Amino acid sequence: MDLFTQLLVAAVSSGTPLLFATLGGILIERSGIIQLGAEGLMLMGAVTACLTYLNTESLPITLLAVFAVCALLGVLHAFLTVTLHANQIVSGLAMTMFGSGFSAYLGKSVSGTPLPMSVPKLHLPWIENVPVIGDLFGRLDMLTWFSFLLVIVMHLFIHRTSWGLHMRAIGDNPSTADVMGIHVQAFRYGYVIVGSMLIGLAGADLLLVYSPTWIEGMTAGRGWIAVALIIFARWNPLRALFCAYFFGALDTLGFRIQLITSHIPPYFLKMIPYILTILVLMVLGYRNRNKPSGSPEALGVPYIREQRF
Amino acid sequence: MEHRKPLWMAGLALLIMVVFALAGCSSNGNGNSGTETANATANATDGATTVSNATASEKKTPRVAFVYIGPPGDGGWTFQHDEGRKYMEEQTGIKADTVENVPESADAERVITELAQNHDIIFTTSFGYMDYTLNVAKKFPDVVFVHCAGYKTNDNMGTYFGKNYEASYLSGIAAGKMTKNNQIGYVGAFPIPEVIYNINAFTLGIQSVNPDAKVSVVWSNTWFDPTTERQAAVSLLDQGADVLMAYQDSPATIQAAAERGAMAGGNDSDMSRYAPEAYLTNPTWNWGPYYTKVVKAVQDGTWTNEPYMGDLKDGMVGLASLGQNVPDDVKQLVEDAKAKILSGELNVFNGSIIDQTGAEKLTAGETMELADILAMNWFVKGVEGTIPQ
């Protein structure tokens, strides 16, 4: 494997948790609800995965438990923002604070306990000898394959189905959607719940596939990167795939540069992802300055029937 | 006006959530930190008398506390300190308090100050607590502070560590024999002398059996962050290294190496349980006897702030049993070298030692002073990597 292929492989493996979280966030925000709780949801997903796996040693039960816990948190976020019309930013931030604190509390007894590698890998012998492609796809785990599938399904769902059209309508102009006979509140609940489950899956993926040991705060800001990725990807699942891998690559680039050249201090290398984030924001912002941002138009605005804005 | 009420309710719901979140936070750090602070303020007026009263009445059974950098479940550094605490509790019958996950920041000073108010001996078990421990030690002259791996002391503050580079040298012998392509990787924690002299000792051990092997170093700048340490290990494996060594407290490097069929060692404790088939060996710590000694000395009133430096010989430093896939002849080589270190025949930092630039740091026959070892800031020849200045 040459350096570029190695970087690609590393980018996919460290980008997959980001991808799940970004996809979940897109689903929620497309329906008009701001999602800032990703960090807390990922931590809750990871700690649930760790506790369930250590107690049951069954991957399906673990994933079900992660989905259940994060769906509950999703219900809470939806109840606050959709039913009670609470400030979505504050509710999201509270979710992050709650998730970070509560996951640390729950995970105290298992902190540092290593888990066995539990997610089965799909070996594709016929593809393994193809250069680059073989290294990339030859031995990926099931969750990574699921993330590919999810990107395609979500892309088709949002842009090619009437359900997706309804979802965009709810996010862009809920009162019109309501007039069309779409139950805005029910759908918003649904998307917030499903999206929260996907963000929880991101945390579970981080724990089960990427770094199989629970430690307090193990997401280390990845939830916030996912929030930024939603905006980079302009609420589009296909773009989310590339953005997540781009950031995944940045994550591992520092150590590789340390090994190639010894003249750049590692502290500077640690800064690179953040500097590039700012640069990418500037370049994208400049390039798209005359285009719509792609943001759902009613994002962050609570929908109250028959109320004028 | 219709929507005023729901907003108000939402605010209340949020408040409840935040309270829960904060409750989660505080019980994670130190369950009774709140009450301790309350006590502190209550005692503020007669603080001096309270402290001296406490020491007078508790002379027979000192109240002991430990400050940990990570969780005892880290499988490495904090795990070994916690084992040491348990050993001390068994030997002395004194139950110690612990505070885990204390960051090396102003938080540490806050935690140590809180503990100092109702404890007689406080062990602060990470290098980064040095200045905070010293600050608190000056404020509480009747409390004994014992700080690990530092160099600053006070009348009531001692320091302790061990010559773990002796065990790093032995790990190097095993690594030098086990590598097939002569590419060995080292995941360094922080570019501080403690890590640097261990990397050097490891490299000298390798060169004693395999002069052609090279050691590549990456710095993770973490003590315990498995996600980052794993990336660092994977980047070394991608570069071709077939034996890895790590200085962090987590087994992330061993786990990463095992997945790629490489061999690896970690640090601090016997980490073979994380990947028995890939495990090499690594230096280990055994703090229990020292902790017992300190607690008993304080109890008897014979404690002094004399810095303590343990080694292989007194057992504070050890070498984990070699992994199941290390052949017997390699085990024998390591055992022979260990015997020589124990007898004093072999000294790890013995001349001649040449640094990365080719300059001779130590002439043949010379032995390096301990003070020079503890301040080392250069790599020996054969190490590939730099020390950020």
Image (cartoon, coloured by chain):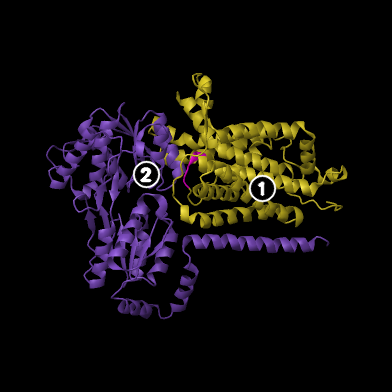
Chain colours: A yellow, B purple
- Crowd rating for badge 2 (residues with CA inside 10 Å; few <14, some 14–19, many 20+): few
B153 with respect to A184 (left or right):
left
Q: Chain of mark 2?
A: B
Label 2 to label 1: alpha-carbon separation:
40 Å
Q: Amino acid at mark 1?
A: Gln
Residue A212 sits inside the magenta stretch: yes
- What is the span of residues highlighted in magenta in the rendered image? A209-213
Tell me residue A92's x, y (percent). Answer: 65, 52
Find out whether residue B116 is within the magenta segment: no
Crowd around label 1: few <14 · some 14–19 · many ≥20 (10 Å): many
> In percent of the image, x 76 and y 31: which residue is there?
A160
Q: Are marks 2 and 1 on the same chain?
A: no
* Residue hosting label 1: A35
What residue sits 45% from the left and 60% below the top? B107
Picture coordinates of residue A216, whole percent (x, y) = 49, 52
- Residue A152 in the image, given as x and y percentages of width and height: 67, 31
The answer to whether residue B243 is left or right of residue A22 is left
The answer to whether B107 appears left or right of B213 in the picture is right
Is disc 2 placed on a helix, strand or loop?
helix
Name the main secondary structure of what is drawn in magenta: loop
